[in-house]
Every structure is written in structure tokens, then in C-alpha cells.
Amino acid sequence: MGVSYIDFKEVDATTYDAIVVGSGFAGAVTARQLAERHGCRVLVIEKRPHIAGNMYDEYDDAGILVHRYGPHIFHTNEQRVFNYVRQFSGWIAYQHHVLADWFGTYMPVPFNKNSLEIAFGEERAAQLIAKLVDVFGDERKVTINELREQQDPDLAEIADFVYKNVFLYYTQKQWGQTPDQVDPSVTARVPVFISRDDRYFQDTYQGMPALGYTALFEAMLGYDGIDVCLSTDATSVFELVFQDGDEDARLSAIKVKDTVFTGPIIYSGPLDELFVGRFGRLPYRSLDFVYETYEQEHKLPCGTVNYTVSEDYTRITEFKYLTAQSAPNTTIMKEYSRAYEDPETQIPYYAIINDENRAHYERYLDMTKSLSNFFPLGRLAEYRYYNMDRIISLALDLSAEIGDKLAAGEMRVER
Ligand SMILES: Cc1cc2nc3c(=O)[nH]c(=O)nc-3n(C[C@H](O)[C@H](O)[C@H](O)COP(=O)(O)OP(=O)(O)OC[C@H]3O[C@@H](n4cnc5c(N)ncnc54)[C@H](O)[C@@H]3O)c2cc1C
């Protein structure tokens, strides 16, 4: 069946067992599980004019399937997660490859044995590879900090090369930082892969939904008992009730259409937005995407090219590699990283995670802890970076936990 779309004006909230805010993987998986496994009627509230969250894809004017919120490649080591998404779509096998554009020469990312040969020439690379294998073993990922800890000039040379040519400028563009602002803990994690494996991900299960993500989400949300309200912002339809009527106190209830909603509310939007940024906005990085179509079969040598020493965009993706679409023309997308300044016009993409911002987030989270039927879930509501597979896994767990509570008679909607 197709997705049941409903105008919020027509909604009688008392007829639903659960409300889900957001239709990305956090929201869609939870909605589907609550409806299918636990017999709930679920209302999904989505502020965008379409479902599928950041995974949303559509055909552009040139007839090419493009991702509108950044390129999304599915990869997981969790079989349960892969089996779950496979129910809703056919899948094509796809292994993502990323090349760094290094002064006009391409080298594989993560930096590996093949990259070493390109950067240092075959003879020197052979010496460096022998040293790497000798110290760390073959087919291992080591960080540039681990290389430096060895106090070995060869290994330090590799670490310095990767830092300067693969990591530094890219990271500065991505996070809008100067070199001295780049957190050492981030630098510490930059990997060198002692391998000839040029794939970007090494997960057991990798692929792309055959008809695209939007079609997959339509199959997931097209289920008896799920209604979806598009172009509806939860912050404008939720009325927050605070303990003792004090707006600085914790939440005591959420009203929808003047009635306290007692069923589970799964919220996958930003927590600060819910409280109108009472303690100030949570910091994020945003992105701008610029699309270009070319009358040629392919523009790039692989799915994504990272610009690690030049250009003001971070990377370019050519979707046809990801989607296996066959067409005489192609569309590429350049990604520009931006400061997140205006929630009205920009999208929060990457939480800027550090101790201060985490504490800032915790203040918002604390206001919700008093509400036993409120469940923040997802990259925005938890102020974290999650890959798709992780969020699907968490959504499966959360919906099971909520299902148990409903079965035990908790959080029931009075009718
Ligand atoms: C540029 C980029 C590339 C990525 N590439 C990959 C990749 O290749 N592989 C991978 O595994 N992961 C990737 N990710 C991570 C992936 O996007 C997340 O794992 C996924 O989006 C998490 O799903 P979610 O439901 O938590 O969030 P989202 O997909 O963002 O969904 C949240 C939904 O909530 C809605 N919403 C927000 N506020 C409100 C509100 N107030 N009222 C109503 N609705 C609201 C939003 O409109 C959105 O539809 C990438 C992320 C980014 C930013």
C-alpha cells in the first residue's frame, strides 16, 4: 500500500497510540515497528514536504537520481539491520570508493599501500610498506598518532604526509577551523590502512536500495495504521506543559490539539528547537550542495573525490556510481561546508561535539527526563553523529522497549 498522508488539520490525536516526529530512519523504523509488531496507530509528523529524512533522493531535471541531503551509502556489520532494510526494497551491490585529489593526482582514501606508491614512488613506498607491516602487521588500520608514537623516522614521515596532504585542509574546510583549532583527538584518529583494499568501507554488508531511498521509505511507511503529516513542524503543534507551570522547570506533559498526549512520543528533531532555543542554540555545521549536469556518461573516476589540498568545496560525488543508473548524461554534486547560523534557511548536518556543547545539550535533555512517554532518538535529538545502520539498530531496540511498556499497560492513550 502507499503512504497514508493526512493534513494535520484533520488529525484527531486521541485516535493514535503513538506520535513519531521525523521520518528519517529513526522515525520511520520506529513507526513501522510500533504499527506492525505492536498494533499501534501511529501519527508521523514531518516538517519537510517529503518523507525519508536525510536519505531523501529524487530524479533531477536531467533524469538522474540524486541525493538531496548528502550522499548516503549503506554499510553495516549488523546482519539484523541489513535483513531489516532488505524487507522494504531490492538491493544492488555497491562498494564505495573515494579518491583524494592531490594536486591533480588521485590517490585512494583511506590512505593505503596504493596511496603510498602514488605519493612516494614505488621504490620508497616498498620500504615504507615493509616497515609498516613489520611494526603493525598486514591488513591493519593504524592511526597517524600510533605511527608517531613509534619514534621511527619512516613512520613519522608517513604520518606527516597524511596529516598535511589528506587530513588538514579537508578538516579545516569541513569544520571551519584553523590548523591550531583542529582538536588533537580528531587528528589522533586519522587512519592509514596497511592494505591494497581501496574500498572506503570494509563492512560485511554494503549496498544501495535498488529504486532509491525514498522508495524504500515509502514501502516502510506505507503500512496500515501509519498516517504521515508532511510540512508540519512538531514545535508548532506541540504545546509543552512544565512542572508547576514554570517554564524553567522540567516538562510534565505534551499537549496536542489541547489534549495531553499520554502515548509514546518518539522525537527525532533537534531538542533545542523544541524549547525554542531557551539556553541558546546547539552548534552545528551546515552544508550547501551545488549540482552540475554533464552530457557525458561519467565525470569522475569513482563515486566520490575528496579535495584535500585545493578548492573550497570538500568533495564531489557522482551519483550514477552509487545508484548504478545507466544514462548518457550525469549529475555531480559539490559539497560546501558552512557555519550553521539560521535554522529558518539552513539545515543542521553535523553536531559540533565537544565537552561544552555536550553539556549544553544535556541541559535540554534534562528538561525532558521527567516525561516518561518522551523518547529522543536520532542524530538530531541525541546531538550525535550516527551512521544509518546504527540508528536503525537503536530504533529497533527502542520500539521493542516501547512495545513492552505498552503491553504492560504503561503509556496507554485514554479513549
Ligand atoms: C552529509 C551526510 C552524509 C551522510 N552519509 C552517510 C552515509 O553514507 N552512510 C551512513 O550510514 N550514514 C550517513 N550519514 C548519516 C545519516 O544521515 C544519519 O544516520 C541519518 O540521517 C539518521 O537518521 P535520523 O532519522 O536520526 O535523522 P534524519 O534523517 O535527519 O531525520 C530527521 C527527520 O526529522 C525531521 N524533523 C526535524 N525537526 C522536526 C520538527 N521539529 N518537526 C517535524 N519534523 C522534524 C527532519 O525534517 C528529518 O526528516 C550522513 C549524514 C550526513 C549529514
Image (cartoon, rainbow, N blue to C red):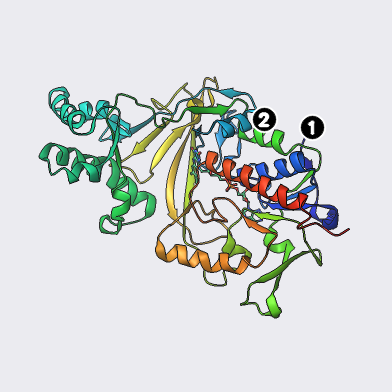
Please tell me which residue lies in front, 150 or 267.
150
Question: Of the numbered discs in the image, which one, if any, rests on residue 90?
Answer: none
Label 2 neighbour load within 10 Å: few <14, some 14-19, many 20+ = some
Asked if disc 2 is less than 8 Å from ligand 1, the answer is no
Q: Is residue 176 above or below residue 299?
A: below
Q: Quadrant of the C terminus?
A: bottom right
Q: Three-letter amino acid code at disc 1?
A: Met
Q: Position of residue 380 (x, y in %)?
A: 55, 54
The mark closer to the camera, 2 or 1, is 2
Residue 1 tag number: 1
Q: Position of residue 226 (x, y in %)?
A: 78, 43
Compared across the picture, whether 116 is left or right of 29 comes to: left
Q: Quadrant of residue 265?
A: bottom right
Image quadrant of residue 102?
top left
The answer to which of 155 and 221 lies nearer the viewer is 155
- The answer to whether any part of residue 275 appears in the image is no
Distance in Å between CA atoms under marks 2 and 1: 12 Å
Give the quadrant of the N terminus.
top right
Q: Residue furthest front?
A: 408
State the SS at label 1: loop
- Residue that protrudes farthest toward the right in the picture: 415
Secondary structure of residue under mark 2: loop
Q: Name the N-terminal-most of marks 2 and 1.
A: 1
Residue 169, horizontal then vertical, whole percent = 29, 47
Q: What residue is at 31 percent from the left and 56 percent from the top? A: 183
Residue 386 left/right relative to 87 = left
Density class for disc 1 (Cα within 10 Å; few <14, some 14-19, many ≥20) is few
Q: Is residue 298 visible?
A: yes
The residue singled out by tag 2 in the image is 88
